[in-house]
């Protein structure tokens, strides 16, 4: 993410009422000084051309990204180990990053391969490099060079060709672990969105870095809007949230609905959310709308319509939730039995592995 020099001068809610309303401190959950191992968006793929280099701040880490002559992207620490100059103002020479200041050159492994002063490169000079992947038109970076996980795919679309559309990036004034809870809080569906569906909750955790939470229920027919929804979508409604590494969420809505209660013609809609910290008190959220790529002109139009439906569904609810997160002081002291998915989510977050980008 590009540097942003805006200064946050407002006192955070979590810094207030410390004596009268003490907060529980968790190992990982809601910690600004902990960055877990996971995939984080750096920039759009098109922002880094062939033989180009730029630097970005990602979760408090200064990262240098360069693309060589074969279009292969590399990520490494962004300060030259010689005198600390920003490598992003340098250039790419012979598929290496050349520092602007003294022209030291570093290869894709972070090793110094050339010094124009006539001396041999110091053998111990090596920049830390990171795992990189390009997906959904974005460049992603992982703090662990040897991670065994790729950038997540939508569960229903794994291995399939997809179409995607980037939503507008927005910010929240709380940790992204808090904003991620929004999709698994069944109470607020009725209190905020006036959606009265009694939900059954199913929680699965197949891998240590992932958790799936599915909510399903019967659509009531008390209100006019509920009766219309029941006519159009059938009796039951379900949606799911899949969390990966505590920094990516995949929302799937309209699961198993039947148009007019009979016809299974509406496929699920998918939204991937990429989260990351900007600074203490500021979180960035990047929504990506994804669907299956269908053949032919009609298939393309259908896919685009589904992406549009995903956007309409998301933005119709986003505004109603927004003000909640601008001054929230999230407490975990008094969770109710109906908050069970939130409690399990917090336990999952606390088991995640902090990365070398953490400040603890």
Image: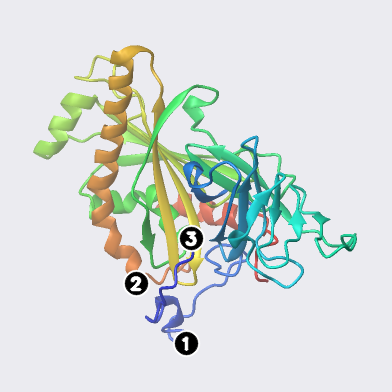
Q: Residue at x 53, y 72 (%)?
A: 24
Residue 240 lies in quadrant: top left
Q: Residue furthest left?
A: 224
What residue did someone put label 1 on?
19
Mark pair 3, 1: CA separation: 37 Å
Mark 1 surroundings: few (<14), some (14-19) or many (≥20) residues within 10 A: few
Q: Looking at the image, which is closer to me, 167 or 209?
A: 167
Could you tell me if residue 203 is visible in this image?
A: yes
Helix or strand or loop: what does disc 1 sit on? loop
Badge nearest the viewer, 2 or 1: 2
- The C terminus sits in image quarter: bottom right
Disc nearer the start of the sequence (3/1): 3
Mark 2 surroundings: few (<14), some (14-19) or many (≥20) residues within 10 A: some
The total number of labels drawn is 3
Mark 3 surroundings: few (<14), some (14-19) or many (≥20) residues within 10 A: few
Q: Residue at x 50, y 22 (%)?
A: 160
Disc nearer the start of the sequence (3/2): 3
Disc nearer the start of the sequence (2/1): 1
What residue did someone put label 3 on?
2
Residue 245: percent from left, percent from top: 58, 49
Residue 100: percent from left, percent from top: 65, 63
Q: Is residue 213 above or below residue 307?
A: below
Residue 57: percent from left, percent from top: 55, 62
What residue did someone put label 2 on?
327
């Amino acid at each position: 993410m590009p540097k942003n020099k805006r200064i946050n001068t407002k006192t955070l809610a979590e810094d207030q009422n410390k004596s009268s309303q003490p907060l529980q401190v968790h190992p990982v959950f809601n910690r600004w000084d902990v960055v877990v191992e996971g995939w984080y968006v750096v920039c759009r793929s098109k922002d880094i051309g062939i033989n180009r280099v730029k630097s970005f701040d990602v979760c408090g880490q200064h990262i240098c990204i360069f693309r060589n002559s074969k279009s292969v992207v590399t990520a490494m620490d962004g300060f030259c180990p010689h005198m600390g100059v920003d490598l992003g103002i340098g250039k790419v020479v012979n598929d290496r990053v050349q520092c602007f200041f003294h022209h030291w050159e570093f290869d894709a492994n972070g090793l110094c391969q050339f010094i124009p002063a006539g001396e041999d490169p110091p053998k111990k000079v090596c920049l830390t490099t990171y795992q990189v992947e390009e997906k959904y038109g974005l460049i992603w970076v992982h703090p662990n060079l040897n991670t065994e996980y790729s950038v997540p795919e939508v569960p229903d679309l794994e291995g399939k060709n997809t179409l995607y559309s980037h939503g507008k990036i927005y910010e929240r004034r709380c940790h992204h672990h808090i904003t991620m809870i929004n999709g698994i809080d069944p109470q607020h569906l009725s209190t905020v969105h006036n959606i009265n569906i009694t939900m059954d909750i199913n929680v699965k955790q197949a891998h240590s870095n992932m958790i799936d939470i599915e909510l399903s229920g019967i659509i009531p027919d008390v209100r006019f809007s509920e009766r219309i929804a029941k006519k159009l979508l059938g009796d039951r409604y379900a949606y799911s949230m899949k969390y990966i590494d505590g920094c990516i969420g995949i929302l799937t809505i309209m699961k198993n609905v039947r148009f007019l209660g009979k016809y299974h013609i509406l496929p699920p809609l998918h939204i991937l959310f990429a989260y990351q910290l900007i600074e203490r008190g500021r979180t960035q959220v990047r929504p990506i709308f994804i669907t299956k790529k269908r053949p032919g002109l009609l298939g393309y139009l259908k896919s685009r319509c589904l992406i549009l439906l995903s956007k309409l569904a998301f933005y119709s609810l986003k505004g109603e939730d927004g003000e909640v997160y601008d001054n929230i002081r999230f407490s975990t002291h008094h969770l109710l039995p109906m908050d069970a998915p939130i409690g399990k989510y917090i336990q999952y977050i606390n088991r995640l592995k902090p990365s070398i980008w953490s400040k603890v």
